[in-house]
Image: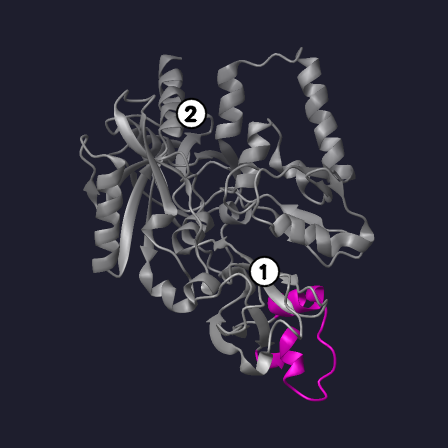
């Protein structure tokens, strides 16, 4: 895993075996892309056990540490899985089939198998509402239609199809094409065989997608803004023109940084509970909890109200964050201040034990995943590497550069409650155009 977006693994944490088990690798996630890049079927990982992260193995007594290692945003991250019997058997069948065919598969066939998700409809109703995509290149899933009994349609229950996915095949016939040919082919095929059961429908991810970032979410203690988007100018392999692409996400300032916390500050209260040097302020509260217990408390509580203490200027004996001690920090005379955060992940600081072995001191300030990264990471699209096409419906002119775009984003964000961005994955667009032209040629 190399991208700075969520791993994309649904995990069962309360399995009777005591190990972390994989529920699935959902569509549109980094995990599924990693599996596809390795030419592996994501379905084989269902029920598998996570054995190691970045070469460190975790036993039954260290599953909490394993969970923390998975949540650690550092990249790259290498994960070792132990497949269950069903997944292992499926992997063996795949490998055997490959060997039986001499390991040879045409590039177009291999690409199409990874590109297209096929579902078989056996019930009377298809359960899908379609809309036109990109001037008729294809039909796109607009919504799912529940049955008369209120149950989700069969196609939705498979988990293979999402809203905005493109209809690519009807009973093996490709229904993609420019200048409205894809839409016409899809409607014609559905009219002819739409009532036949089973009906095999193929779907692909779209190459163009919109996302609306709503500033009102900042009220829920999210941080960040357009500065999270790391843009760069590259030459398009598709059009050969210079385009602006999303290269990566930058970390946003967390609650600690925006709240004025400095390296060396002492954490003294968590939601009114004394910790570290704070325990010396209250009689009879006992010794300070250990660092790991403090971190566990921070992760469990939400929202967080934290109080920090900082030595006054005359207390010049405080030299580094490790020299905190009853002698180097006069807690009663220290300056205190408070801040609030919705959860630990929004705090953006690393704590360490003071030199005296009991104080909880800020070791470093870190960035956090901001509003843009969270909302775009939650969407089922590959934004990183995609071309930015428009801002609030206005297409970018060919002469713009990164600086102009960044300034435009900042102005729009400051003046409006939300901003709408349109991205185009040119690699996928080229793949789908090839798929359409390949079938037309046949």
**In front here: 204 or 325?**
325
**In front here: 62 or 391?**
62
Residue 193: where, in percent of width, then height?
41, 33
On the question of residue 198 being in view, the answer is no
Which numbered circle lies on residue 173?
2
**Quadrant of the rendered image containing residue 236:** top left
**In front here: 8 or 366?**
366
Does the magenta portion include 170? Answer: no
Instruction: Establish if 242 lies above or below 67.
Output: above
- Write the start and end of the magenta stretch as one range: 271-300
Where does label 1 land, which residue?
A: 320
Q: Residue at x 49, y 51 (%)?
A: 153
Instruction: Establish if 177 lies above or below 300.
Output: above
Q: Secondary structure at mark 1?
A: loop
Task: Looking at the image, tell me whether mark 2 or mark 1 is earlier in sequence order.
Answer: 2
On the question of residue 235 being in view, the answer is yes
Q: Residue at x 34, y 21 (%)?
A: 237
Residue 15: where, in percent of width, then height?
75, 56
């Amino acid at each position: 895993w190399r991208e700075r977006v969520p791993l994309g693994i649904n995990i069962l944490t309360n399995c009777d075996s005591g190990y972390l088990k994989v529920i699935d690798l959902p569509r549109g996630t980094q995990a599924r892309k990693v599996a596809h890049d390795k030419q592996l079927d994501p379905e084989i990982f269902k029920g598998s056990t996570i054995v190691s992260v970045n070469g460190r193995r975790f036993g039954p007594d260290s599953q909490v540490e394993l969970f923390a290692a998975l949540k650690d945003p550092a990249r790259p991250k290498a994960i070792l899985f132990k497949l269950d019997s069903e997944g292992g058997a499926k992997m063996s069948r795949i490998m055997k089939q490959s060997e039986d065919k001499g390991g040879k598969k045409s590039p177009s066939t291999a690409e199409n198998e990874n590109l297209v998700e096929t579902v078989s409809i056996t019930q009377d109703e298809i359960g899908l509402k379609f809309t036109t995509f990109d001037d008729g290149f294809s039909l796109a899933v607009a919504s799912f239609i529940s049955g008369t009994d209120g149950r989700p349609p069969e196609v939705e229950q498979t988990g293979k199809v999402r809203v905005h996915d493109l209809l690519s095949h009807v009973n093996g016939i490709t229904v993609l094409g420019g200048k409205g040919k894809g839409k016409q082919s899809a409607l014609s095929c559905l009219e002819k065989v739409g009532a036949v059961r089973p009906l095999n429908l193929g779907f692909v991810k779209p190459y163009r997608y919109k996302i609306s970032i709503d500033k009102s979410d900042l009220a829920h203690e999210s941080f960040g803004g357009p500065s999270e988007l790391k843009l760069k100018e590259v030459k398009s392999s598709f059009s050969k023109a210079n385009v602006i692409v999303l290269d990566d996400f930058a970390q946003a300032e967390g609650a600690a940084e925006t709240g004025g916390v400095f390296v060396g500050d002492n954490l003294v209260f968590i939601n009114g509970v004394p910790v570290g040097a704070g325990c010396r302020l209250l009689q009879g509260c006992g010794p300070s909890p250990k660092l790991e217990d403090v971190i566990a408390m921070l992760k469990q509580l939400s929202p967080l109200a934290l109080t920090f203490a900082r030595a006054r200027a005359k207390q010049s004996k405080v030299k580094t964050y490790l020299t905190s001690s009853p002698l180097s920090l006069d807690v009663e005379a220290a300056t205190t201040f408070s801040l609030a955060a919705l959860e630990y992940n929004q705090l953006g600081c690393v704590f360490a034990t003071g030199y005296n072995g009991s104080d909880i001191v800020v070791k470093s300030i870190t960035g956090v995943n901001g509003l843009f990264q969270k909302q775009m990471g939650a969407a089922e699209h590959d934004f990183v590497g995609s071309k930015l096409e428009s801002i609030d419906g206005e297409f970018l002119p060919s002469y713009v550069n990164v600086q102009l775009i960044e300034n435009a984003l900042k102005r729009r964000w400051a003046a409006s409650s939300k901003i709408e961005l349109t991205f185009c994955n040119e690699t996928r667009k080229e793949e789908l155009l090839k798929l359409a032209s390949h079938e037309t040629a046949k």
